Amino acid sequence: MTTQWRHMTGAERILEVLLTRRSVSPRRLQSPGPNPDELDAILQAGLRAPDHGGLHPWRVIEFRPQNREALAWCFEQEKLRRDPLASPTDLRRAREHATRPPLLLGFVVSPRERSKIPAREQWLGAGAALGNLLAAAHQLGYGAIVLSGERCFDETLVRQVGVQPGEYLAGFISMGTIREAPPQARETLSQNVWSCWQGDLLPGSPDSDQSILPSDRVRGS
Ligand SMILES: Cc1cc2nc3c(=O)[nH]c(=O)nc-3n(C[C@H](O)[C@H](O)[C@H](O)COP(=O)(O)O)c2cc1C
C-alpha cells in the first residue's frame, strides 16, 4: 500500500481504494469470483477508459468452468511444444494456470488496422482499459492479476482460444475472492515519474538547458 509509512493526505484518503490496489496471485484466490452482474460492471469500467476514436481496441474471452479442462490441455500441450522434456510437475503447473482461477478472462488487444488512430494510441487505450478492469475488480473487493507468460506468444495456443490474426493475446486475467492477502506493495515515489517542463526555449532565456529535478518538487505544493 502506498501509505503504510506515513499519514495519508486528504487526496490520498479519497483515492484510497485505487491506491491500495495490488495484484493477487491465483494461488491466493478462491471461489467465488465475480458474478455475471459484477463481471458486466467490471467490463463497463473497462469501456470507460480513455479511448481515442471510441474504437475499444480490446476484448475479453471468458473461460467458463466447464471448459477449463480443455484449456488446461491446451496449456499442457503448449508447455510440451516449448519443452518436450517438461516434468510432470511442470505440466501440472501449466494446467493449474487454466484450472485454478475462479474467474478467468483472456485479454485481447485488437488494434483496428485501417483506423486514423495511431496503433500506439490504440495500445495505450487497451492498456488503460486493462487497468480499469483490475481497479474495478479491486473496488468490488476481489483480487485480480494479469499474467502473460510464454503461452501468450504461442501461435497455436493463441488460435486455439479464439484470438484472430491481427489480434494479440496480452494476458490472462484471474479474479476471485482473496483467500490470503498479498504482500504489501513497496512505496514508489511519485517523483520517479514526475518532471516539470521549464518552458525556457524563448531566445535569451537564462539556463535554457537546465531542467528541474523531480526531487525539487515539494510534496503538496
Ligand atoms: C499485460 C501484462 C502481463 C503481465 N504478465 C506477467 C507475467 O507473466 N508474470 C508476472 O509475474 N507478472 C506479470 N505481469 C505483472 C503483474 O500482473 C503485476 O502487475 C505485477 O506483479 C506487479 O504487481 P502490482 O500490480 O501489485 O503492482 C503482467 C502485467 C501486465 C500488464
Image (spheres, grey):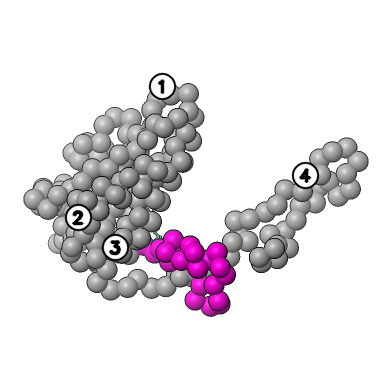
In front of the other: 51 or 184: 51
Residue depicted at x 23% and y 43%: 61
Residue type for callout 3 = Tyr
Q: Quadrant of residue 115?
A: top left
In the image, residue 190 sits, relative to residue 198, either above or below, namely below
What's the distance in space between the residues labelled 4 and 1, CA to CA? 37 Å
The magenta segment is 3-23
Residue type for callout 4 = Gly
In front: mark 4 or mark 2? 2
Residue projecting furthest to the top: 114
Q: Please state the horizontal and vertical placement of residue 2, each as a whole percent of the image.
A: 50, 69
What's the distance in space between the residues labelled 3 and 2, CA to CA? 11 Å
Q: Specify few, some or many for label 2: CA neighbours under 10 Å numbering under 14, 14-19, or 20 or more.
A: few
Q: Quadrant of residue 159?
A: top left
Q: Earlier in the sequence, mark 4 or mark 1?
A: 1
**Circles 2 and 1: CB distance less than 8 Å?**
no
The reply to whether the magenta stretch includes residue 147 is no
In the image, residue 4 sits, relative to residue 138, either above or below, namely below
Ligand 1, seen in the image, is in the quarter at bottom left
In front of the other: 78 or 185: 185
Any mark on residue 23, and which? none
What's the distance in space between the residues labelled 2 and 1, CA to CA? 36 Å
Any mark on residue 199, and which? 4
**Circles 3 and 2: CB distance less than 8 Å?**
no
Any mark on residue 142, and which? 3
**Circles 3 and 4: CB distance less than 8 Å?**
no
Residue depicted at x 22% and y 57%: 34
In front: mark 4 or mark 1? 4
Residue type for callout 1 = Arg
Look at the image and tell me in which quarter the C terminus lies.
bottom right
Residue on which disc 2 sits: 35
Residue type for callout 2 = Asn
